[in-house]
Image (spheres, rainbow, N blue to C red):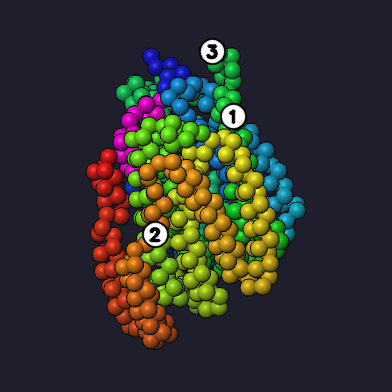
Amino acid sequence: MRGPESPTGPASRPGPEVLGQAARLASSGLLLQVLFRLITFGLNAFTLRFLSKEIIGIVNVRLTLLYSTITFLAREAFRRACLSGSTNRNWSQTFNLLWLTVPLGLFWSLFLGWVWSQILEVPDPNVVPSYGVGVAAFGLSAVVELLGEPFWILAQTHMLVRLKVIAESLSIILKCILTAVLVVCLPHWGLYIFSLTQLLYTTVLVSCYAIHFMKLMSSQQSTKKSLPISRMTDLLPHITVKGTFVNWKEAKLTWSFFQQSFLKQILTEGERYVMTFLNVLNFGDQGIYDIVNNLGSLVARLVFLPIEESFYIFFAKVLERGKSVKLQKQEDIAMAATVLESLLKLVLLVGLTITVFGYSYSQLALDIYGGSMLSTGSGPILLRCYCLYVLLLAVNGITECFTFASMSKEEVDRYNFIMLALSFTFLLSSYFLTKWQGSVGFIFANCFNMGIRIAQSIRYIYRYFRESPYRPLAGLLPSPFLIVVYVLCGVVTGISEVFLCCERGWLTRLLHIIVPGAQGEQSQHGLFGRGVQMDDLKLEMRREL
């Protein structure tokens, strides 16, 4: 029987196999994110017709921020530390460490729930009733989701892609169905609708993971899949044979990542914190900004986030933390450099495409999605600026992915001081730029901070590969041909918007989509046909290996 102290299967596999699994995980994650975002995209457009923008602002900004803050602070550091384990890991100690996320999440839920209910501005009960119930429900849902952390880590380290797809797809689909039914039948319930659906989502998600591993243990397939457990009780916290509750090396790394996670959360959700704590926008304007923000970040979440999460695992397994390039296997260094350069080329092309075409299609997209409520006023300007921010998001996601996967504990600690300065700068710039430029100031502040973070990561990557013959940062240098193509596409689509969109009827809108869009599609086909799509990227990297 395989005991809990057995080494993990994937950690002992050769680099090319881990690379293939990471690529498959990224591809499946990409498809999963596409499904999620398409469903939520349609759901948001649907609910806009039934609910007030104040309720949308409360749910999408205030309550979602509460939920994301609790889960991020309680589990992000544990996830990063436990995904970087060695082949000789004691899994009992790892599970013990992961279960600490539950009391930590309960603490953050109670503390932040009190802040959200007693300290922050409470919405008018006549406009947004049952605010306290919403705070309690979203805090409870965060704690429920933390109960599945041991299952999630086990599934991620063993590349159980199908489990992740089924669990997250089922939970989000059921949540969307219940939301649509309640919005149509009982729109007066307001926040009760979103409280029930949020609890349903987390409950189904955790249940899917638990049921899968229960069936796996009962069917005696755990040995075939190289799982480090043979029964469900191995996942529960208990004292190990050596008498140590946790692996102190993992615990110290978790603490380092926790300090970093706290700062990263401020940078990631900074504009929502400013809106929530400083009241620079009313709840209605917060709702409009959040809708535009979700539209602008659609591709970033669909494409870049799955790639970042999957290849963080790849880099963490192939490279050894804290060791210089000369002290590691050169074939692993070569593979990591090749993958990093290819990923940078991919995200750069996707980001440039979004930036160029998004400028001319922002107003039309908002008009189709939410009508005049979104397409007039500051909505189009917000989305156009966000297209530039997406380009920076794309580059930052990959550079930080490599940086955090290869940094030593000491380097992570030093980077925390930089993140602290960035957090303070971001909050100040967000506040003053918003006072000056309104909601567009949030995007300007995000762009500024993202640029600094990219510069820090590029500096680290340059120094990391300085003593090797590899230069993966070359992936960030577009060719002159590429620049000319994008300039021409931007000019053509800009002229098309002036003469064809968006107040001259649906026929001209259709022409605005077809004529320049066809040119852009041909340009993209010529560019992406050179081997930078996900499938071609995998084939190219395998050939080089």
Is disc 3 in contact with disc 2, using a CB cutoff of under 8 Å? no
Eyeballing the image, is 372 above or below 54?
below
Q: CA distance from mark 3 to mark 2?
A: 53 Å
Mark closest to the chain's N terminus, 3 or 1: 3
- Looking at the rendered image, the disc whose residue lies closer to the viewer, 3 or 1, is 1
Does residue 19 show up magenta in the picture?
A: yes
Instruction: Please tell me which residue lies in front, 422 or 387.
Output: 422
State the quadrant of the N terminus.
top left
Instruction: Please tell me which residue lies in front, 42 or 452.
Output: 452
Q: CA distance from mark 3 to mark 1?
A: 18 Å
Type of the residue with mark 2: Leu
Prevalent SS, magenta region:
helix
Q: Which residues are magenta?
A: 8-25
Is disc 2 in contact with disc 1, using a CB cutoff of under 8 Å? no
Eyeballing the image, is 93 above or below 129?
above
Residue under the image location 30 percent in, 65 percent down: 524
Residue under the image location 51 percent in, 50 percent down: 459
Q: CA distance from mark 2 to mark 1?
A: 39 Å
Instruction: Please tell me which residue lies in front, 183 or 333.
Output: 333
Checking the image for residue 299, the label placed there is none
- Residue of label 3: 241
| x, y percent for residue 469 | 37, 43
Residue under the image location 54 percent in, 16 percent down: 240
Checking the image for residue 251, the label placed there is 1
Type of the residue with mark 3: Val
| x, y percent for residue 534 | 31, 51
Examine the rendering and report whether any part of residue 163 can be seen: no
Eyeballing the image, is 385 above or below 215?
below
